[in-house]
Image: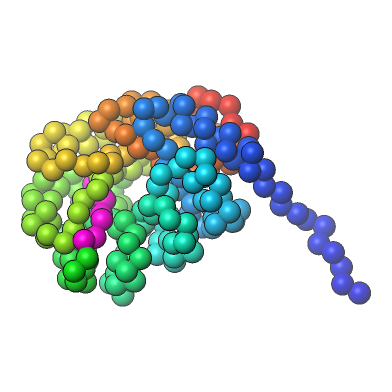
Amino acid sequence: MAHQHRNTLSIDLRALKENFHKLEKLSSPSQVMPVLKANAYGLGAKEIAAELKESGAKIIAVADLNEALDLRDLDIDILILGDIIPEEIPLAIRNNFILPIGSLESAQLISEHAGERRVFCHLVIDSGMGRLGIPATQALDEFAEIAKLEKLHFDGVYTHFPVAYSDREFSLQQIEVFKDFLNQCPHTFKRIHIANSDGIHNIPEACQAPFNLVRTGLNLYGCFDLEGAQRVQLE
């Protein structure tokens, strides 16, 4: 006799949509980009992404190529946030995903595989996290070389807050470092983002110009970092 599972997970799509719209209002005038890492934290990225697209999301982000491939039929812009390894590049290009560029070397590899395609990319700047992107002190010089690669189209640029929930001063310094790059860079980026969920709640400056996009993951499901602020009530 088969035993029925006694544990179930029920997902309230109405609450998801309500949270998304609350975050839109809180982050205005910036748009909200849902980050659906790890199968939307196990909740089902395809279903979550479809609902968020219907709710008005124009772009979503994932951690890696496999996550992007699972969502490629949704007809929505998909940004891969994590590094692309060399063997993944051709498949990522064929599927028209937006790729992260965090070094001249990765830019050259992607350009070499582009063929006749124009590859949309987001430049990644390290403004203090110390893990991803071109160090801000080198970014202008390195991007000047990257920008010579004609197959790459830089739709956006971003950096990341590591401690927005606990260190406002450090996070504001990151904003200034990032703004310095933007002010000196001759390229105009369509999408500029620094705020994650913690940034939305603790660093409201990260939702204002020149920034026009914010990233959020756990907030969509009503979760917060308990150490930080909560500027809006989510379900």
The answer to whether 28 is drawn above or below residue 189 in the figure is above
Relative image position of residue 63 (x, y in whole percent): 42, 57
Of 130 and 76, the residue lying toward us: 76
Relative image position of residue 212 (x, y in whole percent): 32, 34
Of 23 and 85, the residue lying toward us: 23
Residue 147: name its quadrant: bottom left
The residue sitting at 87% across, 68% down in the picture is 3
**Quadrant of the snapshot with the C terminus:** top right
Name of the residue lying farthest toward the right? 1
Q: What stretch is highlighted in magenta?
A: 118-126
Relative image position of residue 23 (x, y in whole percent): 49, 32
Look at the image and tell me whether residue 165 can be seen: no
Residue 161: name its quadrant: top left
Q: Does the magenta stretch include residue 20?
A: no
Q: Main secondary structure of the magenta part?
A: strand
The answer to whether 88 is drawn above or below residue 181 in the figure is below
The residue sitting at 53% across, 51% down in the picture is 50
In the picture provided, is 202 more to the left or to the right than 93?
right
In the picture provided, is 63 more to the left or to the right than 15?
left
In the picture provided, is 110 more to the left or to the right than 92?
left
